[in-house]
Image (cartoon, grey):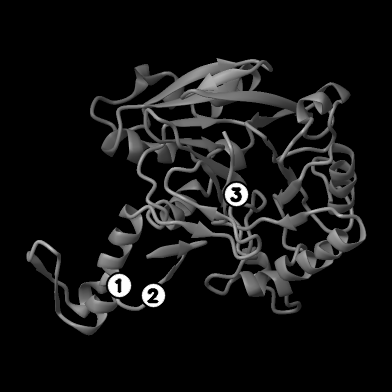
Amino acid sequence: MAVFLGIVRRPPHTLLSIALSTPQFSFTNNKSILISKQRYSQFKRVLTASIHSSTTSSRTGTEVYADQSEIIFIGTGTSEGIPRVSCLTNPLKTCPVCTKANEPGNRNRRLNTGILIRHTRPSGNCNILIDVGKFFYHSALRWFPAYGIRTVDAVIITHSHADAIGGLDDLRDWTNNVQPSIPIYVASRDFEVMKKTHYYLVDKSGIIPGAAVSELQFIIIKEDPFIVHDLEIIPLPVWHGSGYRSLGFRFGDTCYISDVSDIPEETYPLLKDCELLIMDALRPDRSSSTHFGLPRALEEVRKIKPKRTLFTGMMHLMDHEVINERLLKLRETEGIDVQLSYDGLRVPVNL
């Protein structure tokens, strides 16, 4: 069975096909299990989560195998998410993108920006999150079971806004039920914010005995390379509004910059020979004071010259199909490979 970008495609003569048509099937050891049609949905979810099948990107034809590292886009939207409630409840104006996003499976549906690095290594696989925003629970609920993700082995924080750290409290499900603790890699300036916003996770002395809170280990990082589960992470300092420092990160040949309004000159050498660039692109027409818009993001792509670029952090003015059709033309005119990402997208990477 293959899982194609989150959609289970059931070829003929598989266990799932047999389970749909008959109440019983046998394995080669002659042991049989009974599966009713009512139990099929549950069986399908468990089987999908446990079998590490190849995954094919519909655009590139690239396959992700069980022994290959990959990036999973946990979310690709703004802090408020897409669709906006205000758009869906507006009786005077219809928002085309939010209307589409309200349909199940539509690629305009976007939660807080973040990725999961599934690092495949000889000593065992590990899952490294970059950011846990305020919608993290909803992202994890959708993608973790679908892609067989069980543990959260580390979290790396880009900055201390709610769409990057608002889900720290939700990590209690993992530290209470899956693993004893989770290391959180965070810059000192952002840790100071966490001391206020998540004071009970930083200092547990005031916690009532028996209360269940996330068990987190805060590890302070600087703007120097550091190691997370055998993977070298290189910080990419950027500006996220005037005077506000945020971090992108490079791992292997991939560069990830989710929240940026300007790139300092000293950061560009760290982006050299980038195979995959994942970068902020808020809106189609212009930049804001804190985020690249599509025109500026494309300027940076031309300057950095990655082999491939996936934009993230899109607001409701960015229609997935419409913008991607426009971006495809750049491949013909300039040889630039750029597209919008979407929630649940899986991309193989070399780490």
Q: Which residue is mark 2?
A: 11
SS assignment at label 3: loop
In the image shown, does 350 or 132 lie closer to the viewer? 350
Label 1, residues with CA under 10 Å away: few <14, some 14-19, many ≥20: few
SS assignment at label 1: loop
Question: Label 2 sits on what residue type?
Answer: Pro
Question: Label 3 sits on what residue type?
Answer: Asn
Q: Are marks 1 and 2 in contact (CB under 8 Å)?
A: yes
Nearest to viewer (mark 1 / mark 3): 1
Is residue 85 shown left or right of residue 198?
Answer: right
In the image shown, does 72 or 312 lie closer to the viewer? 72
Q: Is residue 265 above or below residue 136?
A: above
* Residue at the image position 34 percent from the left and 55 percent from the top: 49
Question: Label 1 sits on what residue type?
Answer: Thr
Q: Which residue is mark 3?
A: 112
Which of marks 3 and 1 precedes in the sequence?
1
Distance between the Cα atoms at labels 2 and 3? 34 Å
Would you identify the image quadrant in which residue 212 lies? top left
Residue 64 picture location, percent across and down: 51, 52
Distance between the Cα atoms at labels 1 and 2? 6 Å
Q: Quadrant of the N terminus?
A: bottom left
* Residue at the image position 42 percent from the left and 47 percent from the top: 66
SS assignment at label 2: loop
Q: Which residue is mark 1?
A: 14
Nearest to viewer (mark 2 / mark 3): 2
Label 3, residues with CA under 10 Å away: few <14, some 14-19, many ≥20: many
